[in-house]
Image (cartoon, rainbow, N blue to C red):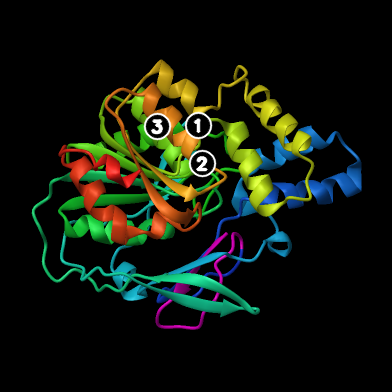
Amino acid sequence: MIAPIRQEGACRDIRPGGPRPPASQRSTFNVSALPFLAAALVLLVTGCTPGQIVAHQFLKAPRRFPTLIHPEPRVYFSFPDRVTDTIPVQHATVGEPPVDLAYRLIPPGDYGAGMGVSNLVVRGQSRPIYRFPGHPSKRPLPCRGTVVLLHGYGLDHETLIPWALHLAEKGWLCVPVDLRGHGVSGGDRITFGVLESRDLMGLLDELERRGQIEAPVHVLGVSYGAALALRWSGLDPRVGSVVAITPYDRLGTAVEGLRESYAPWVPPNLTRRAAEAMPGLLDQPPGGLDPIAWVRDRPRPALLVGATADPVAPQTSIEALESASPGSAAMFIPETSHEMAPFRLDLLVDPVAQWLSGSTPPSPSTR
């Protein structure tokens, strides 16, 4: 789980459906355990087939989960409110069925973006807190193109504000998006790429119509957002470079990793049956929600970032995606968890910027 903390206010969690803390301090948390917990409540009430119940819970919009079943965050982050106070949230209606997507436009500029890490003790547990100081841009910079930023499951675009500030300082116009069913975007259901890829194609259409982006257009995604980046880039020729941070290769692998990490009390065969049921619930063939299938069908070179202590997107998953997509490159962050990896900007900003610029991929020594 990840939770935001505001730098100029009290430390509070941001949880879907709950009040948002002041923008100065954010903590971040991943809600990946919520489908298991929600399914357990439904099972107690209805006694329905467990695998089907878990599958349906995974397809429910994460922002609809009640706050009473939210697990404690494992990672916290913060950035100053004053940075985003001058960058309003905008909205666009896209996709079919139509959905309202929220996004911000963070233009190239001097934001004083930095990074620090320390520990935060929460209920006797020591948790890492990644701090990203910054300020409103003091001067504009020439634009090198656009980077669309896609967050992880159960999170929102604010978890990618640190990435947006760092890449904007390198000349990129950044567009962090709240995906369908997340943050303040609409949608009561998510589809693990089926509708989301169409949403993103429609959003790009709308941004072009509004004159709000500059070519070339690239995409950076994290976890669930990384999987969506792989699918979208294979369908939309307007998308250039792809950066996928901790993408899973098969949905079943990711669901089992979530069970192992957040809900070990759930029987493994239950998660297997749930993962097998989800494609059919979305009128997809078996394996139709697996990024490895999308990449094999429509290969696009991508920078694939893995973490060595990640059960959701293990090293074997990253290597499988790399092998299936000629021209891709993989790098691994040692001794880092799935939740921590996206915040290791100290190790990732320069390789990512090089990849977006079309420069030589990271050295194999990063494996």
Question: Height in image: 340 above or below 135?
Answer: above
Q: Is residue 91 left or right of residue 18?
A: left
Q: Is residue 159 left or right of residue 16?
A: left
Considering the whole magenta stretch, tell me its main secondary structure. loop
Which sits earlier in the primary sequence, circle 1 or circle 2? 1
User: Residue at 57% across / 64% down in the picture?
Assistant: 74
Q: Which image quarter holds the C terminus?
A: top left
The residue lying furthest to the front in this view is 365
The amino acid type, in three-letter code, at marker 1 is: Asp
In percent of width and height, residue 108 lies at 17, 57
User: Residue at 26% across / 47% down in the picture?
Assistant: 352
Q: Which mark is residue 249?
A: 1
The reply to whether callout 1 and callout 2 are in contact (CB within 8 Å) is yes
In percent of width and height, residue 312 lies at 56, 43
Residue 58, magenta (yes or no): no
The amino acid type, in three-letter code, at marker 3 is: Leu
Residue hosting label 2: 313
User: Residue at 83% across / 51% down in the picture?
Assistant: 41
Quadrant of the rendered image containing residue 147: top left
Say what secondary structure mark 2 lies in: loop
User: Residue at 51% across / 41% down in the picture?
Assistant: 313
In percent of width and height, residue 195 lies at 50, 31
Residue 13, magenta (yes or no): yes
The amino acid type, in three-letter code, at marker 2 is: Ala
Residue hosting label 3: 230
Q: Is residue 315 left or right of residue 287?
A: left
Label 2 packing within 10 angstroms: few (<14), some (14-19), many (20+): many
- Magenta-drawn segment: 1-17
